Image: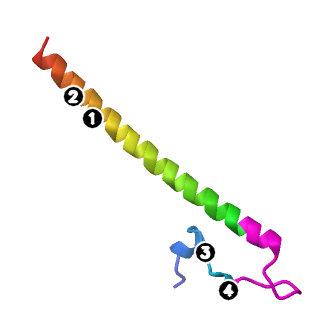
Amino acid sequence: MPNIGIEPSLYLPQFKSKVHQPEDSTGGISPIKSLLRDTFFTTYLMTAMAAELLSLLGILLCGCCAVLKIHEMVNP
Protein backbone atom coordinates (compact mmCIF):
# COMPACT_ATOMS: atom_id res chain seq x y z
CA MET A 1 0.00 0.00 0.00
CA PRO A 2 1.51 3.38 -0.98
CA ASN A 3 2.23 6.03 1.62
CA ILE A 4 -0.45 8.73 1.19
CA GLY A 5 0.96 11.17 3.77
CA ILE A 6 3.06 14.19 2.86
CA GLU A 7 6.70 13.93 3.79
CA PRO A 8 7.92 16.91 5.87
CA SER A 9 10.80 17.46 3.45
CA LEU A 10 8.29 18.31 0.70
CA TYR A 11 6.96 21.46 2.34
CA LEU A 12 9.73 22.61 4.70
CA PRO A 13 12.66 24.57 3.29
CA GLN A 14 15.81 22.52 3.09
CA PHE A 15 19.12 24.31 3.53
CA LYS A 16 22.33 22.54 2.62
CA SER A 17 25.89 23.60 3.22
CA LYS A 18 27.99 24.98 0.37
CA VAL A 19 29.75 21.63 0.18
CA HIS A 20 26.57 20.08 -1.25
CA GLN A 21 25.76 22.92 -3.68
CA PRO A 22 26.18 22.18 -7.38
CA GLU A 23 29.24 23.77 -8.94
CA ASP A 24 29.51 25.69 -12.18
CA SER A 25 32.17 25.05 -14.85
CA THR A 26 34.77 27.14 -12.97
CA GLY A 27 34.53 24.88 -9.91
CA GLY A 28 32.67 27.38 -7.72
CA ILE A 29 29.03 27.91 -6.79
CA SER A 30 27.08 29.87 -9.39
CA PRO A 31 26.70 33.50 -8.22
CA ILE A 32 23.03 33.47 -9.22
CA LYS A 33 22.33 30.29 -7.24
CA SER A 34 24.24 31.70 -4.28
CA LEU A 35 22.29 34.98 -4.43
CA LEU A 36 18.95 33.17 -4.72
CA ARG A 37 19.82 30.91 -1.79
CA ASP A 38 20.91 33.82 0.41
CA THR A 39 17.87 35.93 -0.55
CA PHE A 40 15.44 33.10 0.17
CA PHE A 41 17.10 32.31 3.49
CA THR A 42 17.02 35.98 4.59
CA THR A 43 13.38 36.37 3.52
CA TYR A 44 12.42 33.17 5.35
CA LEU A 45 14.12 34.32 8.57
CA MET A 46 12.62 37.82 8.42
CA THR A 47 9.13 36.39 7.87
CA ALA A 48 9.50 34.00 10.80
CA MET A 49 10.76 36.78 13.09
CA ALA A 50 7.96 39.15 12.01
CA ALA A 51 5.33 36.50 12.77
CA GLU A 52 6.85 35.91 16.21
CA LEU A 53 6.92 39.64 16.98
CA LEU A 54 3.29 40.08 15.91
CA SER A 55 2.29 37.16 18.12
CA LEU A 56 4.07 38.68 21.12
CA LEU A 57 2.52 42.08 20.41
CA GLY A 58 -0.94 40.49 20.34
CA ILE A 59 -0.35 38.81 23.70
CA LEU A 60 0.87 42.10 25.17
CA LEU A 61 -2.17 44.00 23.91
CA CYS A 62 -4.57 41.37 25.27
CA GLY A 63 -2.86 41.60 28.65
CA CYS A 64 -3.13 45.40 28.67
CA CYS A 65 -6.82 45.26 27.76
CA ALA A 66 -7.48 42.76 30.56
CA VAL A 67 -5.71 44.98 33.11
CA LEU A 68 -7.70 48.03 31.99
CA LYS A 69 -10.98 46.09 32.19
CA ILE A 70 -10.18 44.92 35.73
CA HIS A 71 -9.25 48.48 36.68
CA GLU A 72 -12.62 49.73 35.36
CA MET A 73 -14.48 47.05 37.34
CA VAL A 74 -12.66 47.87 40.58
CA ASN A 75 -12.89 51.65 40.16
CA PRO A 76 -16.20 52.38 38.39
Q: Which percent across, then down, holds residue 48? A: 51, 55
Nearer the observer, 8 or 71: 71
Residue 27 included in the magenta stretch of the image:
yes
Asked whether disc 4 touches disc 1, contact meaning CB atoms under 8 Å apart, the reply is no
Amino acid type for the residue under numbered disc 4: His
Amino acid type, residue under disc 1 in the picture: Gly
> Quick one: label 4 or label 3, which is nearer the N terminus?
3
Q: Residue under label 3, please give it.
A: 15
Mark 2: few/some/many CA within 10 Å (<14, 14-19, 20+): few
Lower position in the chain sequence, tag 2 or tag 3 = 3
Relative to 68, residue 25 above or below: below
The amino acid on which the numbered mark 2 sits, given as a three-letter code, is Val
Q: Which residue is mark 2?
A: 67
- What residue sits right under mark 4 in the picture? 20
21 or 2: nearer the eye? 21
Query: Contact (CB < 8 A) between labels 3 and 1?
Result: no
Q: Amino acid at mark 3?
A: Phe
Disc 1 to disc 2: CB gap under 8 Å = yes
Residue labelled with disc 1: 63
Q: State how far apart marks 4 and 1 are (Cα).
A: 47 Å
Mark earlier in primary sequence (2, 4): 4
At 51% from the left edge and 85% from the top edge, which residue is drawn? 1
Q: Is residue 57 above or below residue 42?
A: above
Q: Residue furthest top?
A: 76
Q: Identify which residue is drawn at 52% across, 80% down.
A: 3
Task: Tell me where the magenta segment starts and ends, as one range.
Answer: 20-36
